Amino acid sequence: MKALLIVDVQNDFCPGGTLAVPGGDKVVPVINSLMDSFPLVIASKDWHPKDTVHFKKWPPHCVQNTPGADFHPKLNASKIKKIFLKGSPTALLYADLIPLAIFTLVLALLATHSFQKRLT
């Protein structure tokens, strides 16, 4: 199966958020237009407890159950079939995807600098 994985398109990573990617909201219409091309749309959310050592390195962001952790309001979240909550860029493991029988995975995300450094 072919799937679209939307990575962390959340308010805190968009303009006005606590860890905003400049122009991050500009990916939202593009992602929305891609969704109908995939039989499965899944997403991840950065999802931190209020008190965590993670915030010693990064400013507080995407705190569980806060508006900053919500998807961008213009993202068509109704088409997302499964959401993975994670506390670090490497927390979304292949094991999470195996039960979904995904053979082709296309990523849609705001920023690659932190995520890419951890993968290479």
Image: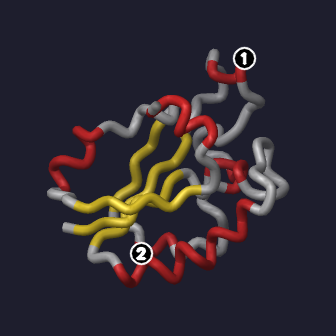
Q: Residues within 10 Å of mark 1 (few under 14, many from 20)?
A: few
Q: Residue at x 69, y 53 (%)?
A: 67
Q: Position of residue 40 (x, y in %)?
A: 29, 70
Amino acid type indicated by mark 1: Lys
Q: Is residue 53 above or below residue 103?
A: above
Q: Residue at x 40, y 54 (%)?
A: 83
Horizontal side, residue 39 vs residue 77: left or right: left
Amino acid type indicated by mark 2: Lys
Determine which of the numbered discs, if any, sits on residue 110 in the image: none
Give residue 50's quadrant in the image. top right
Q: Nearer the viewer, residue 83 or 5?
A: 5
Q: Marks 1/2: CA distance?
A: 35 Å
Q: Nearer the viewer, residue 107 or 36?
A: 107
Q: Residue at x 72, y 49 (%)?
A: 12
Q: Position of residue 75 (x, y in %)?
A: 58, 72
The secondary structure type at the circle numbered 1 is: helix
Q: Earlier in the sequence, mark 1 or mark 2?
A: 1
Q: Position of residue 2 (x, y in %)?
A: 25, 68
Q: Which residue is mark 2?
A: 79
Q: Which residue is mark 1?
A: 56
Horizontal side, residue 30 vs residue 3: left or right: right
Q: Is residue 119 above or below residue 7?
A: above
Q: Quadrant of the N terminus?
A: bottom left
Q: How is the image coloured?
A: secondary structure
Give residue 4's quadrant in the image. bottom left
Q: Position of residue 8 (x, y in %)?
A: 56, 51
Horizontal side, residue 77 vs residue 97: left or right: right
Q: Residues within 10 Å of mark 2 (few under 14, many from 20)?
A: few
Q: Residue at x 43, y 77 (%)?
A: 35
